[in-house]
Amino acid sequence: MPSIRTTALTLAVTATIGIAATPAAEATPRPPTCRGEGVDPSALIRYSTDTVIDAPLATIWRLQTDVKRWPTWQPPVLTADRLDPDPLHKGSRFRWTTPAPATPTTPATTLTITSTVRQLHNHHCILWSGPATGEGLHIDEGVHLWTFKKVRNGIHVHTEETWTGAQVESDIPTATKALGTGLEAWLRDLKRAAEG
């Protein structure tokens, strides 16, 4: 009988050690947030992307938060206006326009987006949201998160966005592709402008 008890004890200890030694990578990562708030967790349309930018964090932050100057370094942003005084802060509002290409269900149009800053932590993160409307196209709410973190070879920039609304949700693959194309371009433009 002692060998059965020894085997059972060995199995119990091995199982316990195996559970305790489970790598952290297997744990479900927490989604990125800004001061505890992130993109819409229930949105059907979502996209995220990352890059490392070899430039000072202050330069990257200034480019990203000086909304009025977006058209000077982001070709897809046609206009950008602050609806309240500087500096950008929680509750700030801004309106900007960007072209939206034609899809099988919508015409080419210019979207007018009115964004409200929901969270902001200076040089760390910013989260804004708002509707987008153009001729023949409407997004009820886009929620857009940016995070900035110093890493060995520069600044790791993460961005993600979600869209909601009956019209864009009627063609999730096309809407997701459009969102992804826009975010990838924005990140490339930010990198180019900051590293300039």
Image: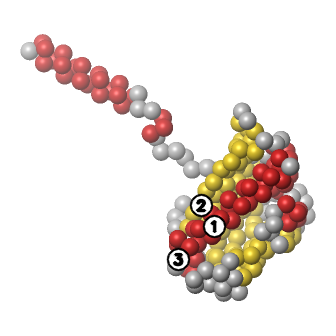
Badge 3 amino acid: Asp
Which residue is under mark 3?
171
- Where residue 89 appears, as percent x and y from the top left, is 81, 57
The quadrant holding residue 80 is bottom right
Q: Residue furthest top?
A: 2
Identified at 58% across, 84% down, the residue is 105
Q: Which residue is mark 2?
A: 47
Are discs 1 and 2 less than 8 Å apart at CB?
yes
Labels 3 and 2: the sequence-earlier one? 2
The x and y percentages for residue 18 are 35, 28
Quadrant of the image occupied by residue 37? bottom right
Q: Give the residue at x 63% y 67%.
A: 179
Mark 1 highlights which residue?
A: 179
Question: Going by the image, does 47 lie left or right of 69?
Answer: left
Q: Nearer the viewer, residue 89 or 82?
A: 82
Residue type at tag 2: Tyr
Local crowd at mark 3 within 10 Å, few (<14), some, or many (≥20)? some
